Image: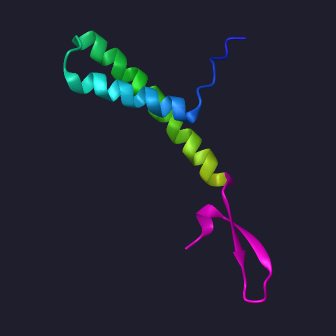
Amino acid sequence: MGKEKEVKFEEAISQLEDIVDRLETGDLTIDSAIDEFKKGIQLYNKCYKKIEETEGKIKLILEDGEGIVKESDFTNID
């Protein structure tokens, strides 16, 4: 198997916030701070990837003047 458990976006954000809070306290040893920082970067990358994937899926439904509904990619909207 070897596949790591998929972390939900909201859970990843919450974990990332907790890591930032721990890093900001300044109470961690340098080794612990580095480990937390690494975990934070991994969570950030997962969240960023999820946002990019979701952005690609978002469709805006546009109605033209004649009442015809069209779909357009979110990233193509000016």
- Above or below residue 12? Residue 78 is below
Check if residue 35 falls in the magenta segment: no
> Could you tell me which residue is drawn at 73 percent across and 89 percent down?
65
Q: Is residue 17 left or right of residue 31?
A: right
Residue 3, position in %: x, y?
A: 67, 16
Number of numbered discs visible in the structure rendering: 0
Quadrant housing residue 23? top left
Measured as percent of width and height from the top left, residue 56 is found at: 64, 53
Q: Quadrant of the N terminus?
A: top right
Instruction: Report the coloring of the rendering.
Output: rainbow
Relative horizontal placement of residue 18, taking residue 29 as reference (left or right) = right
In the image, is 63 to the left or to the right of 32?
right
Residue 77 lies in what quarter of the image?
bottom right
Residue 27 appears anywhere in the view: yes
Residue 60: say if magenta.
Answer: yes
Locate residue 46 relative to residue 29 in the image: left or right: right
The location of residue 52, given as percent across then percent down, is 57, 47
Up-down: is 23 above or below 30?
below
- Where 6 sits versus 46, above or below? above
Residue at x-position 58% and y-position 26%: 7
- Residue depicted at x 60% and y 53%: 55
**Residue 41 seen in the figure:** no
Of all residues, the one furthest to the left in this rendering is 26
Q: In the rendered structure, which segment of residues is drawn in magenta?
A: 57-78
Where is the C terminus found, in terms of image quarters? Answer: bottom right
Q: Position of residue 9 (x, y in %)?
A: 56, 35
Front residue of 17/39: it is 17
Tell me which corner region of the image, top left, top right, bottom left or bottom right, holds residue 40. Answer: top left
